Amino acid sequence: MASSKILLITGVSSGFGRALAQEALAAGHKVVGTVRSAEAKRDFESLSARAFGRVLDVTDFDAIDGIVAEIETAVGPVDVLVNNAGYGHEGVMEESPLSEMRRQFDVNVFGAVAMMKAVLPLMRERRRGHILNITSMGGYITMPGITYYCGSKFALEGISEALGKEVKAFGIAVTAVAPGSFRTDWAGRSMTRTPRSIGDYNHIFDPIRKAREEKSGKQLGDPQKAARAMLAAIAADRPPAHLLLGSDALGLVRDKLSVLEDEIRDWEAVTVSTDG
Ligand code: NAP
């Protein structure tokens, strides 16, 4: 095994967070995992003597610095932060209230940024550290019906990439991990669905919602294999700034980049016409 590390992972009750925690524990690392209830904390800590649960909703921004400081004292220096906690909002944008967008960004973006801001002074002081932000292929490609979700994941992709440039000189790596579709609770119990209200969108949106509900639990990706891929990125001497997970993500993101390149070429004359 590579050297033992302390990982701080948000959202270890299920899905990627749980799988990564289990694989990291099996590899000999210590894992501090955040959950949202005392029961989930007990359940997580029953995995191993090296599993330390902490109760935290990542939108409780004011509590985050204190929890990270307490973790450093009680468990040790956080070598790796994994911003995994997140959920999907599904709904046609015109039908979905701004409050749903705020909540989506509070959890998927502001919570992750608050966690990063809490560990960065400590990692910078130590001149080492690795931050993984679980984004999504929805941070590259877009799909109708999950506009707020895609927006939040595009935001986290951009923040990850820019932050990586700010902290590289301090020995801190930032990796945005973008999974395709995996068998987690994402499209099941965790998804927030705005009720339908505008008939005009029925033909676009109803098949999408139905397909997502039917596919839930049968997605191509295996979270345990994703966890192993993330551990490989954590062990790398030069971790990637971006890591796609899953052949669906690979194909769809490549298609997007190729369509984008075509459109850039088609409009190139107009693009350069504004210089001077
Ligand atoms: P999941 O099984 O539903 O797990 C989500 C985890 O996030 C749970 O532990 C949940 O805790 C936690 N969480 C949600 N809101 C939170 C909050 N406000 N504060 C603290 N914890 C919170 O789904 P998952 O697929 O593993 O999701 C993990 C990440 O992967 C998310 O960021 C998701 O967007 C991303 N992702 C998933 C897929 C996929 O296909 N599954 C694809 C691309 C990206 P509770 O148990 O307390 O709700």
Image (cartoon, rainbow, N blue to C red):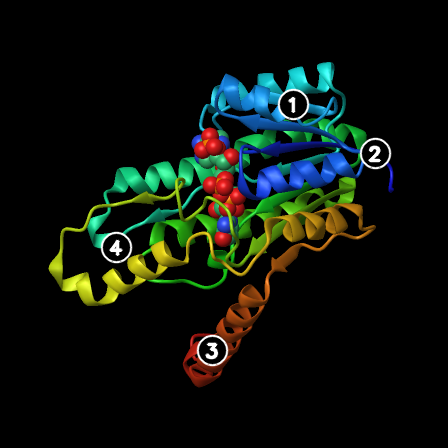
Q: Are marks 2 and 3 in contact (CB under 8 Å)?
A: no
Amino acid type indicated by mark 4: Val
Mark 2 vs mark 3: in front: 2
Residue indicated by mark 1: 46
Q: Where in the figure is residue 226, as x and y percent of width and height? A: 64, 52
**Which residue is at 31% across, 62% downward?**
208
Q: CA distance from mark 2 to mark 3?
A: 43 Å
Q: Are marks 2 and 1 in contact (CB under 8 Å)?
A: no
**Which residue is at 35% across, 50% downward?**
148
Amino acid type indicated by mark 1: Ser
Drawn side of residue 157 relative to residue 269, left or right = right
**Which residue is at 67% across, 19% downward?**
71
Q: CA distance from mark 4 to mark 2?
A: 45 Å
Q: Foreground residue, 107 or 203?
A: 203
Q: CA distance from mark 3 to mark 4?
A: 24 Å
Residue indicated by mark 3: 259
Mark 2 vs mark 1: in front: 1
Q: Where in the figure is residue 270, as x and y percent of width and height? A: 41, 81
Instruction: Decide which of tag 2 and tag 1 comes sooner along the chain.
Output: 2
The secondary element bearing badge 1 is classed as loop
Drawn side of residue 268 relative to residue 164, left or right = left
Residue indicated by mark 4: 92
Q: Where in the figure is residue 216, as x and y percent of width and height? A: 42, 53
Amino acid type indicated by mark 2: Ser
Q: Foreground residue, 59 or 85?
A: 85
The secondary element bearing badge 4 is classed as loop
Amino acid type indicated by mark 3: Val
Instruction: Decide which of tag 3 and tag 4 comes sooner along the chain.
Output: 4
Residue indicated by mark 2: 4
Please say if 143 is above or below 182.
below
